[in-house]
Image (cartoon, rainbow, N blue to C red):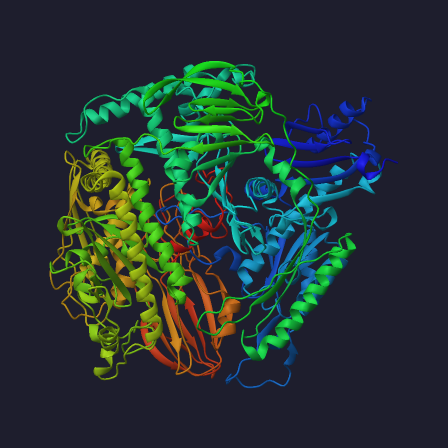
Amino acid sequence: MASPGDRFEFAIDRGGTFTDVFARCPGGKVRVLKLLSEDPANYRDAPTEGIRRVLEEECGQSMPRNQPLDTSLIGWIRMGTTVATNALLERKGEKMALLITRGFRDLLHIGNQARPRLFDLEIVTPEVLYEEVIEVEERVVLQRDGCQLPRREAFQTVTGSTGERLEVWTPPDLVRLEADLRRVLSQGIRSLAVVLMHSYTWSSHEVQVGALARRLGFQQVSLSCEVMPMVRIVPRGYTACADAYLTPKIREYLSGFRAGFCQGLQGVRVLFMQSDGGLTPMEKFNGSRAILSGPAGGVVGYAMTSYSQENRQPVIGFDMGGTSTDVSRYAGQYEHVFEATTAGITVQAPQLDINTVAAGGGSRLFFRSGMFVVGPESAGAHPGPACYRKGGPLTVTDANLALGRLLPSFFPRIFGTSEDQPLSSEDALRELRLLTATVNHFLSTQPGASHSEMSVEEVAMGFIRVANEAMCRPIRALTQAKGHDTSHHVLSCFGGAGGQHACAIARALGMRTVFIHKYAGILSAFGMALADVVQEVQEPCCLLYQESSFTELDRRVEELRGRCEEALHGQGFTRYRKEFGFTIPERPIVVDDIRVRGTGRTSIDHQSRVEPRGTEPRVERVTQCYFDDGYLDTKVYLLEELSCDHSIPGPAIIIDKNSTILIEPDCHAEITQSGDVRIAVGTGKLRAVGTELDTIQLSIFSHRFMSIAEQMGRILQRTAISTNIKERLDFSCALFGPEGGLVSNAPHIPVHLGAMQQTIQELGTELQEGDVILSNHPCAGGSHLPDLTVITPVFHPGVPRPVFFVASRGHHTDIGGITPGSMPPHSKSLQEEGAVFISFKLVKNGVFQEQALTDALMAPSKFPGSSGTRNLHDNLSDLRAQVAANQKGIQLVGELIDSYRLEVVQAYMGHIQSNAELAVRDMLKEFAHRRRQQTGSLEVESVDHMDDGTPIRLKVLINEEEGSAVFDFSGTGPEVFGNCNAPRAITLSALIYCLRCMVGQDIPLNQGCLTPIGVLIPEGSILQPSRNAAVVGGNVLTSQRVVDVIFKAFEVCAASQGCMNNVTFGNERVGYYETVAGGAGAGPGWHGRGGVHSHMTNTRITDPEILEKRYPVVLQRFSLRPASGGRGCFRGGDGVIRELLFREEVILSVLTERRATQPYGLKGGEPGSSGLNLLVCADGRTLNLGAKTSISVKPGDMFQLQTPGGGGYGSCEQLTPPGPLSKKKKKAESTFAERGSVFEYSRTQEAV
């Protein structure tokens, strides 16, 4: 047998399209190859075939494909695979069933109840992974100090692994469960996920259920307590489902892989890459930790080759492929996230923070309403870009080809329907000429635009610049979110398409160095060779992080450390290193879980050297390549012919076997001693940008303006202290013009969309540099009082008045009033709802006015029955954070002005608003044309009612020629004696939301949306109440009815639940507030989604285990409400049933709507069911609480909330029967999976 040094070592990345192989042969020779991952006509398994080819060619002996390979020549194999990712994306995992605690059968369908895309009326969410649900008759409940429920002697008391005490209310009914499991087995299901309440701390019930299932013959049983023992049943449940769904597929693949080798690879060390960037033995590789197996190798690859321990300059990884781009960061240690969403499934497992965005070589190019748009739609592999000769659409690849940046002669002849043709420049140019004609036609109709026609090359270059800016945004977010200066990073580029964009992106971000490894085309495979073995152990915990707990925490850490060391020793490692630490803010911290990560160093020496040639680099050819200055002579080199004494000035192209590297003018490439490419990026020639409209610059400024608002938000999140802002991200940041018109707003919280600009416009003129204003009054653009808006004017030297405004609006937990939380269900005046501010100087001449602010926040206590703020510390801290966020906005606006000049930035502020205006006008013209043809009328109207009978009436008169409309709410009912009054700003927000939904594409959401719109609201009505009217219900309830009325007038879709189902309970020790999902309305071509928030809210709901852990309730049921959606050709979504059993005496308040009225159906569809609020008393009585009430409830009382369903759409001879939606046609979804901390941040911000 060969000695270890005489054996072959293989690192392999099995991707979705290609499999990359890095092989180190005996003697140190390196072999690299790339082959198709699927080629059944020639081989069964791509990694096995790659190994066979290397062995056969290097050993010089025949190794037939149909015979197992001799393993005596193999030292080790390391692999990453997309088997799990692809199975998840394509929903091709193992058939499985979910076992869950009774009452929660739909819990993973509902999830956190937030919809994924805020403005999509057809709410498309990924299918659940399970095919059957079994509700397990069992229940354990955490013991709670102060619980006043009658003590039952029959309850068994147990202690969980966290030290928490629990009561076993219902042991598992295994006899009944066995019958259910046999039924599932008879359906051919052999894989189970078991998810029971509080199993993170007490696993006995799950273990019993799992033992029964295995005895009955289930081949895969994933217990959530074993897969990921962390508190929060929803993500733990998703993780267990992912494990049950994917692990059998991984085992199936591994079994097939073993079969290709003698003795099933016995004696060969085979390691697989996990999502966290560490290797694990093949037998321990499982589904929940395999999702990022392939991309993780790329991160390890660039981290180990691009980062220098000497200068410690952090690195941004930039992996641009055909469909999407992966962005990540490395600064000496890997950056992990411990909960992430892939393909709609939230998985609790350590994963590298790889951010995937919808911008790749195959991203499609559009010209919409005067703006260049790149993606997110992709051409995919089939038909692919236009240049693939298969009738595909215009893409980024086509633009690069048209500009001479891709050279067809260096690509294989694999294109066209016969797959034997070269890339087609002709097809790309043909499609670009058509789009250029569209652009020039638009320009000719714009009075403020330059009338000189754009060339095909200028249009193509414009799309490249827009694509580059789109990819810069997540890089800025990834770095600046954590306080890092983007310009201080190296850009490490790999992947097939990144080399064409690297110089331009680095320059746009202020980076000075681009690094491209010699194995950039197979860097994920190379990363497998450089990775370490990782052993990680964790367990849940519930100790407070305080001095009295340190001894126990240290003991548990040492215990986990011992387990970690033992596992690594068992794999042959003798050294162990551990780091452990905490950051302690000024408040109690609960340690939810303890995790120890051990690393076994296994990486190879990768510092191979290339010899200098002593000659000038050979020029393969000279081509014409288009840049900002037009066509330039561009030298072409082959990377394989370059050596470490070669230096290449731009413009130039370096051709590698798997990628094209563009060296732009004012950039300089050199080959390192290891044979890698290092590019010094120059500042480039500044392009003169004028104030006239340039459609390319319009798109770039749109990204830059949005980036300013986004980065303000990141600062606010980092510096705030409250849960609402720091964790729930319930805030908006925005940029405004000098007259107060909204320019960009991030994120898109519907109720904030049109409101803040009125706040700006209400400011006085006596503002000086160093002043910051605080406002929340409804008459000044406020939505409701807890939403505090902080506004800072932006001054510029030589200009006496503000040139811009920046603002941040955040929801504060409490600002006083008659109830905790400042959202009383029974308020009758504004004063009862908390502290009020109008143009209050929060900062004066640079000094934070803490005493005056404190006095104002405590002022509500002067009113009978009311209190000042109950959380002054958080108020002060969060307001300081809002001031800091605004300051960041001022800095970024200043940098933009320095780059482009004040008049240019202000001009494009106007152009961006005009673009939004144009998109709305185009939509109104199209609707008017269709309406006139169908009815002959350009007037639409509708009416709907609040539960008290108050009408919301709307008449819309559309001007087809202008694309304008007047929304007239005359006839709407008067102000109410209650809190359902909605200030004018709420109606404007609802209107902007509806317009954006009807436009149906991403547009800048700003003041321009309302320019074509006239709004008439009668004073004294419920939609424009008096100055001191109570408004808390208007914000959360009436806003929904305004949306219903607008969509009804335009016949867009049936009504959604039309309510936010506000539930509050509390006593002197605790307070809780939630809004609850219902049914979404159906529309033309889609069923409504059940158990989801709609329209003007998108709040997440508290996880059931967290709810029971922190509050005196037991959640008995949270499931869909069957048949509550309206019937029709397309059925409305079902509402939910939520049952809360109270363990203490509390005050319960409900603030709801659609209890007396029903969400309307449309086009013959039936209405959804009304909601119902019931209290089932401990003495046996059942009370209907009505829509709005506040009541004292006793221990043992149970509140049952039944939320409304959505309306149905269309009448059919055969109505759609009630029941789960069939897996019918879904809206075309992207073929990539957005992921990473930037995606999670955006998703959370749209879910508040």
Relative side of 985 to 43, left or right: left
The residue under the point 47% across, 84% down is 1179
- Outermost residue on the right side: it is 1
- Outermost residue on the front side: it is 614
Relative side of 348 to 217, left or right: left
Position in image of residue 1106 (x %, y %): 50, 69
Where, by quadrant of the figure, is residue 733 drawn?
A: bottom left
Where, by quadrant of the figure, is residue 1148 drawn?
A: bottom left
Query: Can residue 1045 be seen in the rendering of this structure?
Result: no
Q: Nearer the viewer, residue 108 or 817?
A: 817
Q: Is residue 849 above or below residue 1093?
A: below
User: In which quadrant is the C terminus drawn?
Assistant: bottom left
The residue under the point 56% across, 14% down is 420
Query: Can residue 80 be seen in the rendering of this structure?
Result: yes
Position in image of residue 651 (x %, y %): 42, 23
Q: Is residue 624 above or below residue 849?
A: above
Q: Is residue 1052 above or below residue 1026?
A: above
Q: Nearer the viewer, residue 122 or 932?
A: 122
The residue under the point 56% across, 68% down is 592
Position in image of residue 1037 (x %, y %): 29, 63
The total number of labels drawn is 0
Q: Nearer the viewer, residue 453 or 1144?
A: 453
User: In which quadrant is the N terminus drawn?
Assistant: top right
